[in-house]
Image (tube, rainbow, N blue to C red):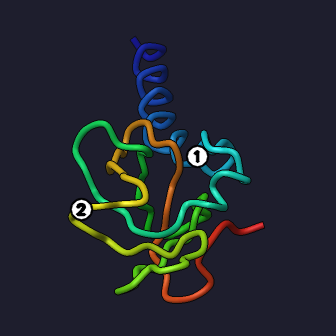
């Protein structure tokens, strides 16, 4: 009985904490491509170009700054739009392609 409880606790801890740690080490998008994700973004529920998880602290794959106009935007500089996006995202806490954190300065991929 104690072994079942210990295994259950370990699995719960892995599910709670293991996912966040794995994202910091293993982004599903190569850094070269991640470094080009900027511009006009539309948030959708299905068929997104990318699945993202928003984190509030820690080490994201991409630091994102929201702007009013994203003309000539670099990586991590996003303008939220309702139509004619450069790319689409869907929020996904379970199996994201990469993690983001919203920032006021230094957007982009961190070394």
* Image location (x, y in percent) of residue 62: 58, 63
* Image location (x, y in percent) of residue 53: 42, 53
Of residues 7 and 99, the one nearer the viewer is 99
Q: Residue 23: which disc?
A: 1
* Image location (x, y in percent) of residue 75: 60, 69
Note whether 11 is above or below 96 in the view shown. Answer: above
Of residues 55 and 38, the one nearer the viewer is 38
From this viewpoint, which residue is outermost toward the right?
A: 111
The residue under label 2 is 83
> Which callout, 2 or 1, points to the residue nearer the camera?
2
Q: CA distance from mark 2 to mark 1?
A: 30 Å
Note whether 75 is above or below 4 in the view shown. Answer: below
Q: Say what secondary structure mark 2 lies in.
A: loop
Of residues 56 and 107, the one nearer the viewer is 107
Question: Of callouts 2 and 1, which one flags the residue occurring earlier in the amino acid sequence?
Answer: 1
Question: Which residue sits at x=51%, y=55%?
Answer: 99
* Image location (x, y in percent) of residue 8: 41, 23
Res 1 quadrant in image: top left
Q: Say what secondary structure mark 1 lies in.
A: helix
Res 16 quadrant in image: top left
Res 63 quadrant in image: bottom right
The quadrant of the image that shows the C terminus is bottom right
Mark 2 crowdedness (10 Å alpha carbons): few <14, some 14-19, many ≥20: few
Q: Residue 63: which disc?
A: none
110 left or right of 59 in image? right
């Amino acid at each position: 009985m104690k072994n079942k409880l210990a295994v259950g606790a370990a699995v719960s801890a892995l599910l709670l904490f293991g996912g966040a740690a794995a994202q910091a080490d293993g982004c599903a998008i190569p850094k070269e491509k991640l470094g080009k994700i900027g511009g006009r973004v539309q948030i959708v529920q299905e068929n997104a170009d990318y699945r993202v998880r928003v984190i509030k602290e820690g080490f994201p794959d991409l630091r994102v700054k929201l702007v009013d106009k994203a003309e000539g935007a670099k990586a991590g500089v996003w303008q939220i739009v309702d139509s004619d996006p450069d790319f689409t995202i869907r929020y996904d806490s379970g199996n994201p392609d990469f993690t983001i954190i919203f920032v006021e300065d230094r957007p982009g991929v961190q070394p």
